[in-house]
Image: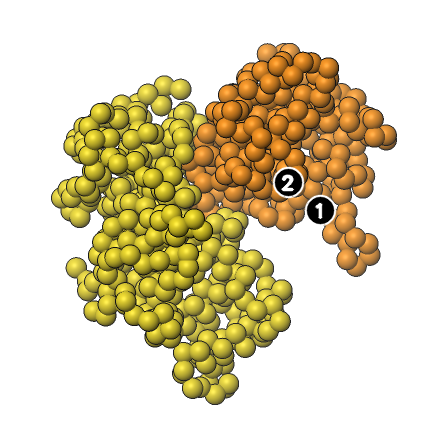
Amino acid sequence: MLNERKPCLQGVGLTKVFGLGRKKTVAVDNVDFTFHEGEIISIVGESGSGKTTLAKMLLGLINQTSGDVFFQGQKRDLSSHRKKKEYWRSIQAIFQDPFSSYNIFNKIDTVLLDCIRMRGGGSLSRDEKTEMMIEACRFVNLKFEELTNKYPFELSGGQQQRLMIARIFLLKPKILLADEPTSMIDACSRSTILDALLDLRNEIGMTPIFITHDIGLAFYVSDSVYIMERGRIVESGTADEVILNPQEPYTKRLISDVPKIREEWDLSTV
Amino acid sequence: MGEVILDVNELTTKYVTRFGDNIYAVDHVSLQVEEGKSLGIAGESGCGKSTLALSLMGYYFPPLHYTSGDIIINGRTITGMAPDDVRRTVLGNDIAYIPQAAMNALNPTQKVIRFIEDVFDAHKMHMSKKEVRETAEGFFQAVGLPEEVLNKYPVELSGGMKQRTVIAISVILSPQVLIADEPSSALDVTSQKMVIKMLRRLMDGGYIKSMIFITHELPLLYNVTDDIMVMYAGQIVEKGSSKEVVLTPLHPYSQGLMGSIMVPEAGLRDVKLLAIPGVPPNLKNPPSGCRFADRCKYVMPICRAQTIPLREVAGGRAYRCVLSPEELSEAHAREVYASHAK
């Protein structure tokens, strides 16, 4: 167990400010957190609470205004393109909208081959690469024979999202940031995708970070939950603590806004 | 038993593709909605929910075509009417339809009040601007929207507020039936709750007589509607009261849907979600027997051999499966028990 509690991603005083002067918006406000290896983390908040900005900072897509990110105990250094590429080998993302996540000019084969090349498999033979692609597709319940020579937009949303997970399977990152991975997908495909993500965690030992507004999802999958409100983390703890016994009024409100089945849904609070 | 407002008999509509294929996205659907009642329609994407909503309006435009069946609203048959008559006399007055992205219906170059004037104009209400404003103000107050909205441009409103504004405008002529197609799916939980609260208010205040609510979020349907109808591949596979369908589903497809519900309640974490493998069939060549056979856990040879009729059980409940209700509930109980042993 001791081994599992190694911190893999840490934020200290992380802040992001957009705009200047009167138009200043503090999207992420002095956020501290420590994510441990092997633990499933959820960051929950409503629209505009800064979840996606935080995710982009963790991915290194935008720079923080102040504060630091520590990756595996070391201060993250993204000063050159090469270092960024190196960093992205360990941290990958799945975004909300599968329809805009792919380059429309690239075939599915290209998408998957790029992943193999990024892992240093560029010199493998064609057969070996195909074998890897077949395995990755089988992992997410897709058939490579049906996908080869097709473009991503020929697939349904759920299939595209699963193809994203197949990419992750090939890349084997240490951390996976999933930004609303199932919000554009209906309830039945949702559980298939979550199952694939959780299997992947067991398979390659990565740390998934879910960013979501769906408290049900956060509660179902995660070990620890962080609740964000207007750029701040207002409550954090294990999933059972936070969801079943919330302390902050904001968390209580978020939970009461979700329609329930076994409990009365109180409409008078809005 | 209230008076039946909307009576649909064996409605069938099809899409005609560029290549001349017929795709029957709504296949012999019958339903009744009584005064003061709401009906929920559930199912995954691509099972015909939204097409059913479009078909119920009686206003067909290519590639959607009417094939057979009747839609009767308050004793008036609207199928077979000229499209222009439907638009002028049925839509808005008898049926209001809210699509999923309703908020985009507002004209970005006009204030909300101008849009409302257009609505009254289009329905030949002949009212002065002052009368329109008074009616609109009164109505907005009644449904709990601030009056300032009327003088604003759509860009000045949040997504949830726009959605509620469009819903309010669509029912301003007090239609008999409101068809809401995923009205809250693009909104966050708090705005969703406000939309639901407003729909409840419209029903309770008598501004609309009945409602059809379409969504794939079952916990939401459970809390909003009186009855639930589950659709699969263009057909009704189960109907019953919300409580029955959500808590004791009969059809294997409904059972799968209920098994994928995630609500933040104690006990959820101990259960493994039951996923339904595979995808819905291609309706260009629907399977001859049960359309769910390829994904069903309890499939038998007989399922594929014959068309399965919708079987009525006591209390207005119906389902489409060869197994008996007892066999199905027993199988479901076994599944649920197994899922708890995660």
- Dot 1: element: strand
For the point 24% across and 65% down, the residue is B72
- Dot 2: element: loop
Asked if the residue at tag 1 contacts the one at tag 2, i.e. Cβ–Cβ closer than 8 Å, the answer is no
Q: Residue furthest right?
A: A79
Query: Which amino acid type is shown beneath numbered disc 1?
Result: Ala
Tell me, for residue B189, which label it has, or none: none
> Which residue occupies the foreground of this view, B190 or B173?
B173
Mark 2 and mark 1: Cα distance apart in space: 31 Å
Q: Are marks 2 and 1 on the same chain?
A: yes
Is residue B148 visible in the rendered image? The answer is no
Query: Which amino acid type is shown beneath numbered disc 2?
Result: Ile
Q: Is residue A182 above or below residue A86?
A: below
Q: Quadrant of residue B152?
A: bottom right
Q: Quadrant of residue B61?
A: bottom left
Tell me, for residue A104, which label it has, or none: 2
Is residue A102 visible in the rendered image? The answer is yes
Image coordinates for residue B146, horizontal then vertical, percent: 52, 69
Q: Residue furthest front?
A: B19
Image coordinates for residue B289, horizontal then vertical, percent: 24, 35
For the point 77% across and 49% down, the residue is A18
> Which residue occupies the foreground of this view, B24 or A16?
B24
Q: Is residue B102 above or below residue A189?
A: below
Q: Is residue B135 above or below residue B18?
A: below
Chain of residue at mark 2: A
Chain of residue at mark 1: A
Relative to residue B193, is residue A238 drawn left or right?
Answer: right
Residue topped by disc 1? A27
> Which residue occupies the foreground of this view, A40 or B4?
B4
Q: Colour of chain B?
A: yellow
Q: Any idea which chain is the orange one in this picture?
A: A
